[in-house]
Image (tube, rainbow, N blue to C red):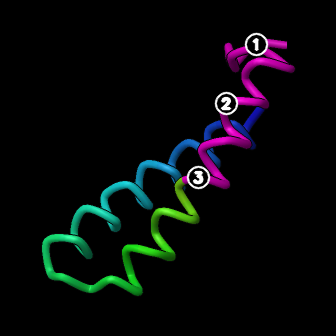
Amino acid sequence: MGVVIIFSLVALLAAYGAFTALKNKNFLGVFFAVGTLAVFGWFAIMTVIESGFPTGTH
């Protein structure tokens, strides 16, 4: 279930990057950061729905 954690971290970093790029008026950066947020956020949400939340136990 480490993939859920990795996808979530990437999505959070992409959200921060989108906010920073928007603040700096870097629209190409906003485009790629929002695209990354959409893809990795979607995969993280769908993985949690399909496989459940990682508990750390077997």
Expressed as whole percent of the image width and height from the top left, the position of residue 37 reads 53, 55
In this rendering, is residue 3 above or below 56?
below
Q: Position of residue 15 (x, y in %)?
A: 38, 55
Image marks 1 and 2: residues in contact by CB distance under 8 Å: no
Mark 3: few, some, or many residues within 10 Å (few <14, many ≥20)?
some
Q: Position of residue 33 (x, y in %)?
A: 46, 69
Q: Amino acid at mark 2?
A: Ile
Range of residues picked out in magenta: 38-58
Observer-side mark, 1 or 2, equals 2
Q: For mark 1, does the 10 Å Cα neighbourhood hold few (<14), some (14 to 19), or many (20 or more) residues?
A: few
Q: What is the distance, in whole Å, between disc 3 and disc 2 at their CAs? A: 10 Å
Q: Secondary structure at mark 1?
A: loop
Circle 2 crowding by C-alpha within 10 Å: few under 14, some 14–19, many from 20: some
Q: Which residue is mark 1?
A: 57
Ranked by sequence position, the earlier of labels 3 and 2 is: 3
Task: Kindly identify the residue that appears in the image at 64 percent across and 47 percent down.
Answer: 7
Q: Of circles 3 and 1, which is in front?
A: 3
Q: What secondary structure is the stretch in magenta mostly built from? A: helix
Based on the picture, tell me whether residue 32 belongs to the magenta stretch: no
Which residue is label 3 attached to?
Answer: 38
**Residue marked by disc 2:** 45
Q: Are marks 3 and 1 in contact (CB under 8 Å)?
A: no
Secondary element under disc 2, as helix, strand or loop, is helix
For the residue marked with disc 3, what is the amino acid?
Ala
Looking at this view, is 44 or 24 the one in front? 24
